[in-house]
């Protein structure tokens, strides 16, 4: 029998790939097959310190490079990302499980971040006013601050880290990226491209690891700010510990996204958009539809339409062209999703489509698209983030009742309404807590030139990810007052 050696990943520090001394590793598995495809080393304080010191040393020079010159490296990176987009998408599918077309979207959205960061020379401009008092002029300029870090989740291996580092380095900071230990291979390839783009040594560094690495990042005295994306309990922890160590923190957390469907909605379009939102990326999206609030008569048509769409899904290995829904990330995740389905049944919801029955030839972590009806706000499946392909339906009497249910949930990441009424749409836009809100949109995802982030328990911090907010997060606004 042929034995394959599984590659043990390295960190990228000071422009070179280095071995990680720590013996602790996490197996990286292809979720479609269960096969171990790499070993991710779980480094600790020493590995983080090495990367931060390299970044700190590089900062002294990098901050003096004119913004126009700094973005030339991002132009090169953008060209390399385009050239290797298909290869990156294949790696995303292999380690995350999502379908190839979803993986292409993950990569494309990431490339768009680089495109916006390239606007740094314009977006970094400050403000000035002559004669703020007699003979006194005042300017405000944006200055970089030093070393920043990001801690990423498993669900968008290409895009989420790119929400941060292109902006941070375009502003003149240097960076340490910690990808999810479940999906470290996409960033490994991306850092090979970063290397080829020729960034000066130490400007961008990659450290692999888990919880211990995160703690070392939060406590490191030379790190000025941390961007986090992941589940709400960890987001809250990162926010509190990072802030206690004097850092700027933006921590994007979990979600429970409510979709309201009015009886006047264009139902076919709504059904397509909601099915894609709930079951795309196997429900592992922080913007995924989680609870559908069907107002009055919308309920019957919506339920029938969703059942029909669910019947069309082909669950399987995301690398195969016929697959329209891939696996969830891990065996543990599969068990968690299945236990939520069990709980929904026990608590009295009607299980309309049962994803536990999914039958595929592969040995991976598959759960089929699942639909519950007659869900109530008190049920566990309506309260907790499932992060899998499970959609809950409730029938409600009117828009006010729907708004009350959505508004009473502690998480408020994204929400949408489907309607042809301007009045209903306006009430929704005006009152909804979620700070990514869609009208006739299934996945209310802001593009790279807008900010991204939720509200309430879905977001800890003040400045959101990417867009103009990134230039606020990654700079200090210094005010210069002069009299000559
Ligand atoms: P996670 O919270 O388990 O892990 C995220 C990161 O935190 C990883 O890099 C991991 O190494 C680290 N981590 C995990 N547990 C930790 C601990 N106890 N202490 C310190 N660090 C820890 O999240 P995940 O499972 O990778 O990703 C899914 C979650 O991310 C979902 O809740 C989803 O809603 C959320 N998410 C949110 C957004 C958003 O924009 N709000 C985007 C994508 C994903």
Image (spheres, helix red, strand yellow):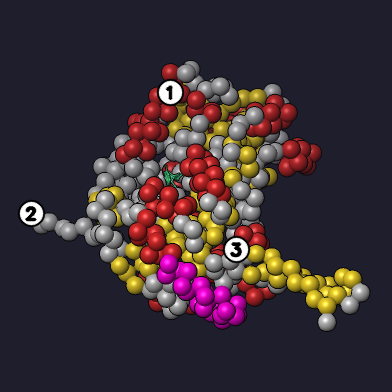
Q: Is 436 one of the magenta-colored residues?
A: no
Q: Quadrant of the C terminus?
A: bottom right
Q: Is residue 227 left or right of residue 135?
A: left
Residue, far front: 484
Please tell me whether mark 3 sits on a helix, a strand or a loop.
Answer: loop
Q: Earlier in the sequence, mark 3 or mark 1?
A: 1
- Does ligand 1 reach within 8 Å of label 2's beta carbon? no
Q: Mark 3: few, some, or many residues within 10 Å (few <14, many ≥20)? A: many
Considering only order in the chain, which callout, 2 or 3, is on the residue closer to the N terminus?
2
How far, Cα to Cα, is label 3 from label 1? 43 Å
Residue, disc 1: 343
Residue 194 visible in the shown view: no
Mark 2 vs mark 1, CA separation in Å? 43 Å
Residue that protrudes farthest toward the left in the picture: 1
Q: CA distance from mark 3 to mark 2?
A: 53 Å
Task: Locate residue 381, reporting x and y percent.
Answer: 49, 28
Residue for badge 2: 1
Q: Which dot, 3 or 1, sits closer to the camera?
A: 3
Q: Considering the whole magenta stretch, tell me its main secondary structure.
A: helix
Disc 3 vs disc 1: Cβ atoms closer than 8 Å?
A: no
Residue 247 picture location, percent across and down: 56, 54
Res. 475 mark? none
Pointer 3: what residue? Answer: 474
Residue 44 image point, x, y percent:
35, 54
**Residue 380 in sight in this render:** yes
On the image, the x and y values in percent for residue 278 come to: 51, 40
Q: Nearer the viewer, residue 464 or 360?
A: 464
Residue range corresponding to the magenta coloring: 53-75
């Amino acid at each position: 029998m042929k034995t394959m050696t599984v590659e043990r990943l390295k960190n990228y520090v000071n422009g070179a790939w280095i071995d990680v001394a720590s013996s602790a590793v996490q197996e990286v598995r292809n979720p479609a097959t269960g096969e171990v495809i790499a070993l991710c080393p779980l480094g600790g304080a020493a590995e983080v310190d090495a990367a931060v010191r390299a970044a700190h040393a590089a900062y002294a020079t990098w901050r003096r490079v004119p913004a126009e010159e700094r973005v030339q490296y991002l132009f090169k990176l953008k060209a390399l990302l385009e050239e290797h987009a298909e290869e990156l998408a294949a790696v995303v599918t292999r380690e995350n499980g999502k379908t190839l077309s979803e993986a292409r979207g993950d990569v494309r959205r990431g490339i768009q971040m680089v495109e916006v960061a390239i606007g740094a020379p314009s977006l970094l401009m400050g403000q000035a006013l002559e004669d703020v008092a007699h003979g006194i002029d005042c300017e405000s300029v944006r200055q970089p601050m030093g070393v920043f870090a990001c801690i990423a989740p498993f669900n968008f291996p290409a895009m989420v880290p790119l929400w941060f580092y292109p902006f941070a380095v375009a502003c003149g900071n240097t960076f340490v990226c910690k990808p999810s230990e479940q999906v470290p291979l996409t960033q490994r390839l991306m850092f090979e491209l970063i290397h080829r783009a020729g960034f000066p040594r130490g400007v961008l560094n990659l450290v692999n690891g888990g919880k211990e690495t995160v703690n070392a990042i939060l406590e490191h005295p030379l790190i000025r700010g941390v961007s986090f994306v992941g589940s709400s309990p960890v987001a809250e922890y990162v926010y509190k510990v990072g802030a206690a160590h004097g850092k700027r923190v933006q921590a994007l957390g979990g979600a429970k996204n409510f979709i309201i469907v009015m009886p006047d909605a264009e139902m076919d379009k709504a059904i397509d958009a909601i099915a894609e939102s709930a079951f795309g990326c196997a429900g592992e999206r922080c913007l995924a539809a989680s609870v559908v609030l069907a107002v009055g008569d919308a309920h019957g048509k919506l339920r029938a339409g969703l059942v029909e769409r669910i019947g069309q899904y082909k669950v399987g290995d995301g690398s195969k062209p016929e697959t329209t829904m891939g696996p969830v990330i891990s065996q543990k995740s599969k068990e968690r999703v299945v236990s939520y389905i069990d709980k929904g049944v026990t608590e009295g919801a009607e299980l309309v489509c049962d994803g536990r029955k999914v039958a595929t030839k592969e040995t991976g972590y598959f759960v089929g698209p699942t639909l519950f009806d007659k869900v109530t706000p008190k049920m566990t499946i309506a309260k907790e983030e499932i992060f899998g392909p499970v959609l809950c339906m409730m029938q409600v009497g009117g828009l006010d009742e729907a708004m009350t249910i959505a508004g009473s949930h502690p998480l408020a990441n994204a929400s949408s309404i489907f309607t042809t009424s301007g009045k209903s749409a306006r009430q929704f836009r005006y009152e909804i807590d979620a700070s990514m809100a869609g009208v006739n949109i299934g996945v209310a995802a802001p593009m790279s030139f807008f900010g991204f982030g939720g509200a309430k328990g879905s977001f800890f911090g003040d400045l959101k990810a990417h867009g103009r907010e990134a230039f606020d997060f990654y700079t200090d606004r210094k005010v210069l007052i002069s009299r000559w």
